[in-house]
Every structure is written in structure tokens, then in C-alpha cells.
Image (spheres, helix red, strand yellow):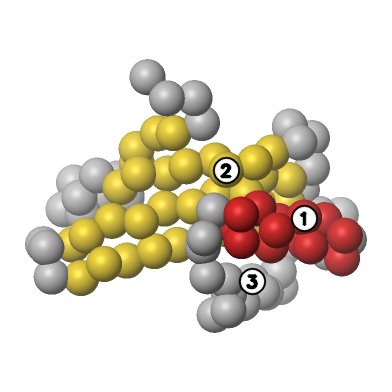
């Protein structure tokens, strides 16, 4: 067993996908990465910065980007997720 590594499947049709928690402070943020090959034809990678705050501090995001860089994960195409329609913090 590997700590912080688990597998998920979003439906019975989709393949099992690794889901790795690269870093967390256990309070405010988790830095997560996933990659898989689909039918041996496509390589797909996902990276998330999961935060309890809709607007994490710039220093928090910098720390997350540093974690990705340390693990050789390209974040150049990452985008912010819009938080519209959510209840106020």
C-alpha cells in the first residue's frame, strides 16, 4: 500500500484511474494529480489544487505550483474553476 495514492472510477464504463495526493496541509489545501492511458491510445493527465477557499492566497497557489514542478508536472494549461452559483463563504 502507498500512502496518499488511491484509485477512482467515475463510472463503470470508465477505467480505474490513479489519484495521487502530492501534498496537503490537512486544513486548507490539497495538491492532487492523476494520469492514465485510455485504451492504450490516449494519455490523459489531470492536476487539481483543492482548496476550502474560493480564493486561496497567492502564496498558497505558489506552493501548489511548486509541488507540481517538483514532480515534473506541467501546469501551463491549468485554469481557474469558476465558483459561480455556490453559497457564500
Q: Residue at x 35, y 44 (%)?
A: 18
Which is more foreground, mark 1 or mark 3?
1
Q: Which residue is mark 3?
A: 81
Q: Are marks 1 and 3 in contact (CB under 8 Å)?
A: no
From mark 1 to mark 3, how far is it between C-alphas? 18 Å
Badge number at residue 87: none
Q: Which of the two marks, 2 or 3, is nearer to us in this view?
A: 2
Residue positioned 40% across, 34% down in the render: 6
- C-alpha separation, residue under disc 2 versus residue under disc 3: 20 Å
Q: Nearer the viewer, residue 50 or 41?
A: 41
7 vs 42: above or below? above
Q: Position of residue 38 (x, y in %)?
A: 18, 62
Q: Residue at x 47, y 42 (%)?
A: 20
Which image quadrant: the C terminus?
Answer: bottom right
Label 2 or label 1, whichever comes before in sequence order: 2
User: Which residue is the site of mark 1?
Assistant: 63
87 relative to 80 in the view: left or right: right
Amino acid at each position: 500500500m502507498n500512502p496518499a495514492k488511491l484509485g477512482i472510477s467515475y463510472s463503470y464504463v470508465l477505467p480505474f484511474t490513479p489519484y495521487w495526493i502530492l501534498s496537503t496541509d490537512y486544513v486548507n489545501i490539497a495538491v492532487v494529480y492523476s494520469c492514465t492511458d485510455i485504451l492504450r491510445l490516449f494519455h490523459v493527465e489531470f492536476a487539481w489544487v483543492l482548496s476550502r477557499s474560493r480564493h486561496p492566497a497567492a502564496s498558497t497557489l505558489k506552493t501548489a505550483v511548486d509541488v507540481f514542478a517538483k514532480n515534473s508536472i506541467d501546469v501551463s494549461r491549468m485554469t481557474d474553476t469558476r465558483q459561480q452559483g455556490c453559497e457564500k463563504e
